[in-house]
């Protein structure tokens, strides 16, 4: 007979930890079971030679009004418990029809700085827009960035892709604007323009525009995870790390507990899983316990694309931007191009993002050193053959646009979908496991259509990025899901 627990939470990423901390604070005694030796999941990181870095890159959107702030309120903490620092300086690189790269500094269009008006001229300069193209660009971008919430809700109800939305609007659109919109879907949502939900796209763009995008918590993401762990434990929660769950035990149609890979049984009438909707339903619980229609529904849910994670440790502080992006007209992918890359096609350029973490928070490196995080979109499958080619291309563009990095490079570290999969989630269907956020922000599974936290099995709930949240980027969505699930368990109306 195994040990009995009031609630078992599978996974100690931000979703599991936030849910656990909230439940413990409400007087429950949950047990978090985490397969890794450390908590953190997708925000896992390390300290090496005085550098504090994330394995996988994180830019928090929105900077103001992030669900981490709501979580602090729900936990009765100061909202600064995970103070998010917004980027102050952004650089944009672009290679247009001229064939040459151009970099424009101090672009403020997506930083949401409260005291500055976003200046479209930065983008026009980057794109070399002609005078008659400029008003067209302003009117299209304003239409997207200023769309009223009720119209976005209608798009959510209709559940159309952003490409379908653009087709419908039939804008007289300069090609540079279209290429930017396609690039933005890849970079901000890790999705293609012809799959991402229009409502989700517009909400995230507006959040960045109004409240700032690409923020980072003071002290690192792992600090946030560790703070949540402390609150959880101080309020009576228990954690078992280094313990992988291989089965959710179901008896008479109800959850009865879990079994670890070592065969230990832990009993509980309530299991909350953050292991991902695909692994939870198709592997841990098992298809046989669900109606076929639910199994088919889960199998059709699309993981987001992957993102390469490239960390550069610099001997000297040579970079002035906090956040930078670069792309060319050839660099961004729609669905068809993604398929081609998966099948071995080698694109000329790739989209790149870069964040100088020490420009947000100098304590993340020894004095006088700099920490740079960069990457590009990639297939989400852990066995994809294209990852090293895409990392190489990212690095080539990065070093071409910012050559000052090269002489001060102390060391570097690469990760990709294989590491995401090994460290955070099992692959149970092709392409899933190494995805960036979790479930993609695609039509049919975003906003109003996000999977529900409650599964058809009595006592089995999902928490984290894949289910129960509403809208927004990875951490935002994951934490929102945790708040909703904790309130649901406690019987608080949500
Ligand atoms: C490359 C990359 C880039 C990202 N960039 C951003 C970004 O810029 N902005 C943003 O907001 N978000 C970003 N995210 C997403 C964000 O990190 C995640 O959405 C969020 O951290 C997910 O938290 P979670 O708790 O839902 O899931 P996870 O962090 O995946 O937590 C799940 C936990 O469950 C554990 N687990 C899984 N299976 C088992 C099992 N069988 N037994 C026991 N334990 C198990 C895992 O080890 C893990 O700790 C990025 C993610 C990646 C990978």
Image (tube, rainbow, N blue to C red):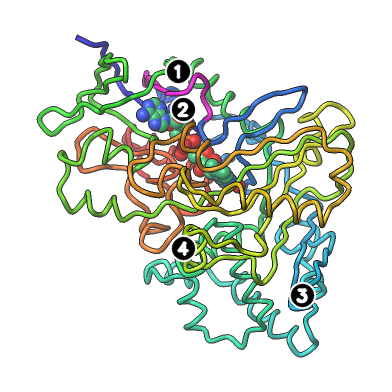
Q: Is residue 94 visible?
A: yes
- Kindly identify which residue carries mark 4: 339
Residue 12 bears which disc, if any?
A: 2
Compare marks 2 and 1 and give the one earlier in the sequence.
2
When the figure is inspected, residue 331 is found, relative to residue 295, above or below; the finding is: below
Indicate the position of residue 407 as horizontal and vertical percent values. 89, 41
Compare marks 4 and 2 and give the one earlier in the sequence.
2
Rounded to the nearest whole Å, what is the CA distance between mark 3 and mark 2?
44 Å
Mark 2, secondary structure of its residue: loop
- Kindly identify which residue carries mark 3: 127
Q: Nearer the viewer, residue 469 or 315?
A: 315
Rounded to the nearest whole Å, what is the CA distance between mark 4 and mark 2?
33 Å
Compare marks 4 and 1 and give the one earlier in the sequence.
1
Q: Nearer the viewer, mark 3 or mark 2?
A: 3
Q: Nearer the viewer, residue 381 or 481?
A: 381
Q: Is residue 70 visible?
A: no
Query: Badges 2 and 1: C-beta atoms under 8 Å apart?
Result: yes
Q: Nearer the viewer, residue 421 or 302?
A: 421
Compare marks 4 and 3 and give the one earlier in the sequence.
3
Indicate the position of residue 192 as horizontal and vertical percent values. 51, 64
Residue stretch in magenta: 28-40
Q: Is mark 4 within 8 Å of ligand 1?
A: no
Quadrant showing the N terminus: top left
Q: Mark 2: give few (<14), some (14-19) or many (20+) Cα within 10 Å.
A: many
């Amino acid at each position: 007979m195994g040990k009995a627990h009031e609630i078992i939470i599978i996974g100690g990423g931000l979703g599991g930890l936030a849910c656990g901390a909230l439940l413990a604070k409400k007087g429950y005694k949950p047990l978090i079971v985490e397969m890794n030796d450390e908590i953190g999941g997708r925000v896992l990181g390390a300290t090496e030679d005085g550098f504090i870095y994330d394995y996988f890159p994180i830019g928090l959107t929105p900077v103001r009004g992030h669900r981490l702030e709501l979580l602090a309120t729900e936990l009765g903490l100061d909202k600064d418990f995970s103070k998010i620092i917004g980027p102050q300086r952004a650089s944009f690189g672009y290679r247009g029809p001229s064939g040459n790269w151009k970099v424009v500094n101090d672009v403020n269009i997506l930083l949401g700085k409260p005291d500055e008006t976003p200046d479209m001229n930065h983008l026009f300069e980057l794109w070399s827009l002609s005078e008659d193209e400029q008003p067209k660009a302003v009117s299209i971008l304003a239409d997207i960035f200023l769309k009223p919430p009720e119209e976005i809700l209608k798009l959510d109800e209709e559940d159309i892709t952003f490409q379908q939305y653009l087709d419908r609007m039939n804008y007289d659109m300069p090609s540079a604007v279209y290429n930017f919109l396609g690039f933005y879907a890849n970079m901000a949502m890790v999705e293609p323009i012809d799959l991402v939900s229009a409502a989700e796209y517009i909400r995230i763009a507006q959040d960045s525009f109004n409240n700032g995008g690409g923020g980072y918590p003071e002290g690192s993401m792992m600090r946030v995870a560790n703070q949540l762990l402390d609150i959880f434990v101080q309020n009576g929660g228990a954690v078992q790390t280094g313990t992988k769950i291989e089965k959710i035990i179901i008896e008479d149609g109800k959850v009865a507990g879990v079994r670890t890979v070592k065969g230990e049984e832990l009993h509980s009438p309530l299991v909350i899983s953050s292991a991902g909707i695909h692994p939870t339903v198709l592997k841990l619980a098992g298809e046989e316990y669900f109606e076929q229609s639910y199994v088919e529904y889960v199998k059709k849910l699309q993981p987001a694309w992957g993102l390469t994670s490239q960390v550069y440790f610099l001997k000297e502080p040579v970079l002035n931007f906090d956040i930078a992006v670069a792309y060319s007209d050839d660099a961004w992918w729609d669905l068809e191009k993604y398929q081609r890359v998966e099948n071995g096609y080698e694109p000329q350029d790739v989209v790149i993002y870069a964040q100088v973490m020490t420009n947000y928070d100098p304590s993340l490196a020894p004095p006088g050193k700099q920490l740079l995080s960069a990457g590009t979109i990639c297939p989400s499958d852990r066995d994809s053959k294209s990852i090293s080619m895409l990392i190489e291309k990212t690095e080539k563009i990065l070093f071409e646009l910012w050559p000052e990095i090269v002489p001060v490079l102390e060391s570097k570290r690469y990760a990709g979908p294989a590491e995401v999969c090994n460290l955070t989630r099992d692959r149970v269907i092709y392409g899933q496991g190494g995805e960036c956020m979790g479930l993609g922000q695609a039509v049919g599974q975003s906003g109003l259509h996000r999977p529900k936290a409650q599964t058809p099995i009595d006592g089995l709930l999902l928490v984290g990025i894949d289910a129960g949240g509403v809208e927004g980027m990875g951490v935002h969505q994951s934490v929102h899901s945790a708040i909703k699930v904790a309130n649901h368990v406690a019987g608080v109306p949500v």
